[in-house]
Amino acid sequence: MRLLVSKSANASSFYVQKDIKKGNSRTTVIVEKLGTETEIMEKYGVADAKAWALDYIASLNRIEKEKKTEIMPVNMKLFPQQTISNRQRIFNGGYLPLQSIYHSLGLNKICKKISSNGKFEYNLNSILSRLIYTRILFPGSKLNAFEESKKFIEDPEFDLHQVYRALDVLNKESDYIQSQLYKNSTKVTQRNASVLYYDCTNYFFEIEEADDEGQLRQYGRSKENRPNPLVQMGLFMDGNGIPLTFDITSGNTNEQTTLRPLEKKIIEDFNLSKFIVCTDAGLSSNANKKYNSIKDRAYITTQSLKKIKKHLKEWSLDPNGWKKYGSTISYNINEIDEEENRDTIFYKERWINENGLEEKLIVTYSIKYRDYHRNIRSNQIHRANELIKKGSLAAKKIRDNDIRRFIRETKVTSDGEIADRSIVSLDENKIMEESLYDGFYAVVTNLEAEAHEIAQINKNRWQIEECFRIMKSEFKARPIYLSNDERIKAHFLICFLALTVYRILEVKLGNKYTVNEITKTLREMNMLKTKQNDYIPAFNRTQISDDIFEVFEYRLDYEIITEKNMKKILKATTK
């Protein structure tokens, strides 16, 4: 079928025409009159009648080609005086794109192999898949996952008590699942294992007392400053932003010690040996650097200028000797035109030998980054002043960026006598000291690559921070209500798998949409089930939904989907 446009003096009319065969000859017939340009624009609320008509005809051709439904109306009888039945009528279809990715990653086959080696009778595949789908769409407890699974078009094939039993099995097989997932994912999406990003975060529990020594839930340094017991997650991500592997350690574990065991797992289980490890300064111990200076491994890590030796700090902050990428001209950053160079990154580099390691120190400076630092400090000083006005004392610092670092508490008079009351004021020396580093950023590496190449690799480290944010905020990986160590680890395995499935979905959609936009679209993709077991979409069609249906080659936004065609869609998502 194709579009026919008939133009007259007053209007353009749009028709759907089709070639048909009569005997040994072919002829063209009009299948449907769509209306004039003005009628289409008014009736369907579109600005471009021709674009709408082409899209409509494309959908007709798709229906005919795939033989998903007949191009004919479906009649239903509804009675004003008849109440609806008490059976479930609204079902979610937004999990189907996730199901397509789940099966393309072979997670169903992984479950089948695990089940064949085990002695349990429940459906591990049904449990794992529903735990992943609900973690993305309707995050909550395991009880919540069980209840939310009933909203899907396909019923869950398990009972609640079986979910908790399955967690023990999933934890036991975690390493196998992760390694197989990586191997299978290389056939689904492009993986960049030449650069690996590593970082740690922690997750709190809604309890006050830590577990016995040797168990996971222990007191540690909380990134949210909470007094609750924690567990710590170490996560590796590949150069394309897709999770690679993870591990869970107790909340009081030094994060620097978590890097090498997980790297060894990557080398042994993933068959990867040549890569660059990119971390922040908190993970860049001398032992970790040395470990990634052998064989085909290398490292890039951020470096605090406040913590380097005096002569290196003076060299780093010296306004002379700066360059632009691609230029050999030397600049003094105190004399540059700020408006003209606002988006320019200046740099300087030198080889250093500290603690027996030969490495390159690269320092960058940016006007925009300087203003960013100044703006943050200005807000912090304002808040510190508010504390001073309220008479708040400079309590023990909690973190390096605590605003109370700018508050000075004086307990003696100018004569050196002990004061009756503490005098609280802004610490101008501390403010001046910190301002010296505004706009500067440093990394160290054992690579001999150009400075701009190293900077570009390090720049993508933000994606691993986003991975943690998605798990914590969107997937609600915290707080955790499980107490058994094995089940706690299984919980994070599910979060890791959900993140991997979601990241691949982002890639398939061209990285055009935010996590909130995607999950909201899928969450709202509800279908109304009729008495005849057909399905009517009960969601708004959007550009995101159009892109999803185009990528996965099925549509849920027809006016009605027959039971037969819905079965075909469900089957297609499990191939």
Image (cartoon, grey):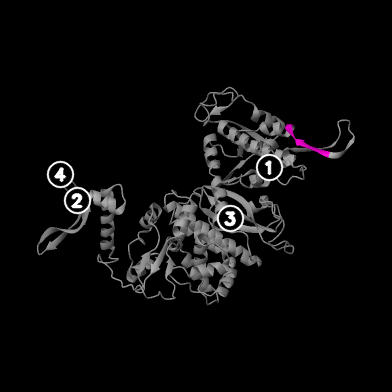
* First in residue order: circle 3 vs circle 2: 2
Q: Residues within 10 Å of mark 3 (few under 14, many from 20)?
A: some
User: Is 391 a magenta residue?
Assistant: no
The number of callouts visible is 4
Give the magenta range: 422-428
Cα distance in 3D space between marks 4 and 3: 62 Å
- Left or right, residue 272 beside residue 398: left
The spot of residue 200 in percent (x, y) is: 62, 51
Would you say the magenta stretch is mainly helix, strand or loop?
Answer: strand
Label 4 sits on what residue type? Answer: Ala
Kindly report which numbered mark, 2 or 1, lies closer to the viewer in this rendering: 2
Residue, disc 2: 13
> Any mark on residue 186, and which?
none
Split into 4 quadrants, where in the image is the C terminus?
A: bottom left
Q: In the image, is 234 to the left or to the right of 153? A: right
**Residue 13 position in % (x across, y down):** 19, 50
Question: Hey, what amino acid is under mark 1?
Answer: Asn
Residue in the image at 56% along x and 41% along y: 458
Q: Is residue 573 left or right of residue 400?
A: left
* Residue carrying label 4: 9
**Pointer 4 local density, CA inside 10 Å: few below 14, some 14–19, many at least 20:** few
- Residue marked by disc 1: 401
Q: Nearer the viewer, residue 297 or 374?
A: 374
Sequence-first tag of 4 and 3: 4
* Vertical comparison of 464 with 426: above or below: below
Q: Which of these two is toward me, 518 or 391? A: 391
Tell me, for residue 472, which label it has, or none. 3
Counting residues from the start of the chain, the first of labels 2 and 1 encountered is 2
Give the residue furthest to the right.
417
Which three-letter amino acid code belongs to the residue tagged 3? Lys
Characterize the local packing of mark 1: few (<14), some (14-19) or many (20 or more) Cα atoms within 10 angstroms: few
Q: Nearer the viewer, residue 493 or 45?
A: 45
